[in-house]
Amino acid sequence: MDYNPNGQFNNSQNNMNGNQNLNNNGYYQNPQNNIPLQKYSVPPYYPVMPQYTVNPQEEQKRKDKKILKTFGFAFGLAIILYFVLSYLVVGVLYALSVPFPSVEFLLKDTTGLYILQGFVSVFCIGGPFLIAFAILRSKKYIGILPYGTTYNKKAAVSLVMFLAPIVLISTIIINVISAIFQDAMGITFESGFEDLYPQGPLGAVVLIFTLAVIPAVVEEFCIRGVVLQPLRRYGDKFAIIMSAAIFSILHGNMVQIPYTLVAGIYFGYLCVATGSLWPSIILHFINNLFSAIEMIVYANYGEEASTFAIFIMLGVLIIVGIAGGIVFFSMHYKTELKDGVNTLRTGEKVGSVLKSPAMIIAIIFMLITTATSVKF
């Protein structure tokens, strides 16, 4: 039984006569045809080279992990730049306050501090996340942010109305639980704004603008825009929760982290459900405006008036929320959250985002800052 160049064995009796069918190279030649073998013939028993096949599913998982790691790099870089720029701005102002005493207005006066906070929000938070957006945009991981009209205006308005009191009540409940926890553990959470109550009409206007208007616009661009939108590729639920976690810890103190985590989930859901950033901006503004009015009333009329104002505003929002809920649910509006790419488990998604060196450094920064807000 012999091997011919066509890869088949021959049972011809002509090949049983010793080496009479050997060619010059020492390999058997097919006696059934006279096609001469080329100089480099295939040997009868050549070694079979191993064939390596790529598992398409594993290759896709590798690509998805790489994409999520890029997300983590962009988000982490933005957070690092935020911390660096914030400390740099404060350091420069302290340095300038020596030759220019008027600069101390931004460091010691209540109104000045809120003006400084507004500047930090726009340039030290918005700027770095704009860079992150540019990075993701250049790699085509994110498209144009959804600043257009909503899927359904009536549904969007009624959903904002319905969620407004829910967000506020959730914040109050979380703050009460936090206060009980602090008393039980003998610790105090500080935000750094405990004694910063606005004085006079100018202070009230500045407070509303820097506490309600600017954060609603800037933070929704950063978190529900730059962070949430690309993450939706891997599922809406994952994107909403992950962006809410980044949103909460970005505040850098234990006073705000718990309730901003919950509020961030509501904001993210609203953005996804309505298809636009504007509803989440409005809901964010309403929530922060409540706090601003409470602070203004407290600063000018005292604690009792502030408590009364809280109950009045909460009552109004509850009535508005009930009306919005009736309209929204009567519409039978579908707010299905999409699963997205499902090649990775949730833990793998989270791990891929957090594995980026930039995100690791950012987390360290945030943990250190958060730890300083806890007083024993």
Image (tube, rainbow, N blue to C red):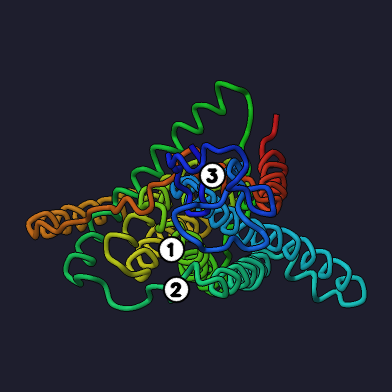
Q: Earlier in the sequence, mark 3 or mark 1?
A: 1
- Which residue has dot 1 on it? 229
Q: Residue at x 59, y 60 (%)?
A: 37
Residue 7 at x, y percent in the picture: 48, 49
Per the image, label 3 sits on a secondary structure element best described as helix
Q: Residue at x 39, y 49 (%)?
A: 265
Along the line of sight, the residue nearer the viewer: 100 or 361: 361
Per the image, label 1 sits on a secondary structure element best described as helix
Circle 1 packing at 10 Å, graded few (<14), some (14-19), many (20+), is: many
Circle 3 packing at 10 Å, graded few (<14), some (14-19), many (20+), is: many
Q: Residue at x 21, y 54 (%)?
A: 321
Label at residue 257: 3
Left or right: residue 219 compared with residue 289: right
Along the line of sight, the residue nearer the viewer: 233 or 236: 233
- Which residue has dot 2 on it? 143
Vertical position of residue 192 compared to residue 102: above or below: above
Circle 2 packing at 10 Å, graded few (<14), some (14-19), many (20+), is: few
Residue 372 at x, y percent in the picture: 72, 41
Q: Residue furthest toward the left?
A: 330
The amino acid type found where label 3 is placed reads Ile
Label at residue 181: none
Q: CA distance from mark 3 to mark 1?
A: 22 Å
